[in-house]
Image (cartoon, coloured by chain):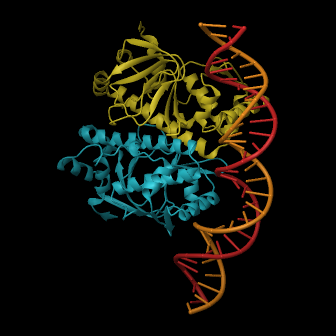
Chain colours: A cyan, B yellow, C red, D orange
Amino acid sequence: MTQDTHFWRPLLKRLANFSEFTEEEAETIAGLSATAQRLCVGTVLIEEGDRPEDVIYLVEGWAARYKILPDGRRQIVAILIPGDLCDVQVFTLKEMDHSIALLSDAKVARIPKRTMLQTMEDTPRIARAMWWSTLVDEAVLREWLVNMGQRNAFERLAHLFCELWLRLKQVGLTSGHGFHLPLSQEGLADTMGLTPVHINRTLQRMREERLITLRSGELVIEDIERLQKIADFNPNYLHLLQRK
Amino acid sequence: MTQDTHFWRPLLKRLANFSEFTEEEAETIAGLSATAQRLCVGTVLIEEGDRPEDVIYLVEGWAARYKILPDGRRQIVAILIPGDLCDVQVFTLKEMDHSIALLSDAKVARIPKRTMLQTMEDTPRIARAMWWSTLVDEAVLREWLVNMGQRNAFERLAHLFCELWLRLKQVGLTSGHGFHLPLSQEGLADTMGLTPVHINRTLQRMREERLITLRSGELVIEDIERLQKIADFNPNYLHLLQRK
DNA sequence: CGATAGTTTGATATCCTTCAAAACCTGTGG
DNA sequence: CCACAGGTTTTGAAGGATATCAAACTATCG
């Protein structure tokens, strides 16, 4: 356990796309939980069928929402990065219809049900910001559906990289045109509804065409404009503040 | 315009999966709007980029959320049936990131922004029920993603039919094992991320295997158990009340 | 009865999967 | 410093699912 308050920075950055907060509101958010826990890759945070008692906040590291089919295939339905909350509203539905596990070693905080509900009740602006983030998650889901339904492997992967880059940039986790991507090719495959083999070949083509480099988990986007064009990437669904 | 109050029946039936309402609450819901409007197939209710001023309630008929790609391809990301609200929370995001259009002639009511916000504020149980329905919509989106990512055309279509059947049954719009399906093969294709031609062949196989009949927009599921098994259909994601 | 949208059919091309093996990393223990 | 284990990436060959294109057929409606 560590004592550390500025681990709320990424969440505040994200929510700032909805509205600026007063000093007091920021402190309320920072007061949601004072401690964080280190957990290692693969740890299952929440499982299908659970009725969680806490909202989980991802401070560092990546996680994924996913569903497993009876024959063992896995579909990742969302990627969570630092600053993301797992289900603000987790108490509204009776039980989880999917699982969440860590994609990397991570630092995680837990917000107790009572604290969460109380805060939502007492500070309407924070409540609205939290709901806003739920709605953005839903918008991302819609875009992923378009991605899966209409785009081929190359465009699809390009789109994912564009999205991750923007989302990470938002919380200050990019360096230049690159970021750390703690996902094996198998993980990418489970995200894109493709085969690891095909992901491999698609990545090779991206490298050949000088769009990206990717080595030992470090992705660099060499030509973001071209990548966005290929992916037909329109960031409107992320509902970020327009900063000209 | 028609005067008709019991068109709130389907919404009340749906929300009943979250909680029962008192007589008074039911009346509050029925008071959200007193009039409905008839509109014909293809009418665009809301377009990408809009900032809607009303919440739209679908009384009769079907609609679809969709996105259009620059080259004209269309991906349907949700199917709306009677009792569905288009975006309870439409005022929280600045602008629409997708469009909604009618899949059939329909009857539609509009709930003004102010009425909606006021009701959410005054009657917390109704507010929570509305949020619940948003969360279920999100769960459906996740399941659709699994459907697109992991299942082949046959399983995918089977899954869609299972879901629609349950959702329609919930609002009392099935007759025996059948229901009205106002979607052309092209519409099904846009929903499933497949070609109309391939949808056609898949439907033929379903008929051959005595799973369904489908003629002039009337779908009958001949063997629901087998269809569910094929689709690996688990209704948990619809978060319906367990009725044994 | 012709016009129009929706469905069906056939032939061929493409994308992606499958399976199996080899090569490559990275960390660990001797 | 080397050897080896386990996971990840890469390669090749072949098969299957779905797309594409174009045309014929069917249904419906004014």
The quarter holding residue B119 reads top left
Q: Residue at x 60, y 25 (%)?
A: B183
The quarter holding residue B174 reads top right
Q: In this image, A116 relative to A141: left or right?
A: left
Above/below status of B58 relative to A173 = above
How many numbered marks are there? Answer: 0
Q: Residue at x 65, y 20 (%)?
A: B217
The quarter holding residue D23 reads top right
* Residue, far left: A23
Q: Viewer-proximal residue, B87 or B68?
A: B68
Q: Quadrant of the N terminus of chain A?
A: bottom left
Q: Is residue A85 visible?
A: yes
Q: Position of residue A56 (x, y in %)?
A: 39, 51
Q: Position of residue A222 (x, y in %)?
A: 45, 63
Q: Position of residue A183 (x, y in %)?
A: 51, 61
Q: In this image, A2 relative to B218: left or right?
A: left
Above/below status of B74 relative to A14 = above
Q: Viewer-proximal residue, A174 or A126?
A: A174
Above/below status of A165 relative to D20 = below
Q: In this image, C9 relative to A189: left or right?
A: right
Q: In this image, A47 relative to A3: left or right?
A: right
Q: Position of residue A218 (x, y in %)?
A: 46, 67
Q: Is residue A46 visible?
A: no
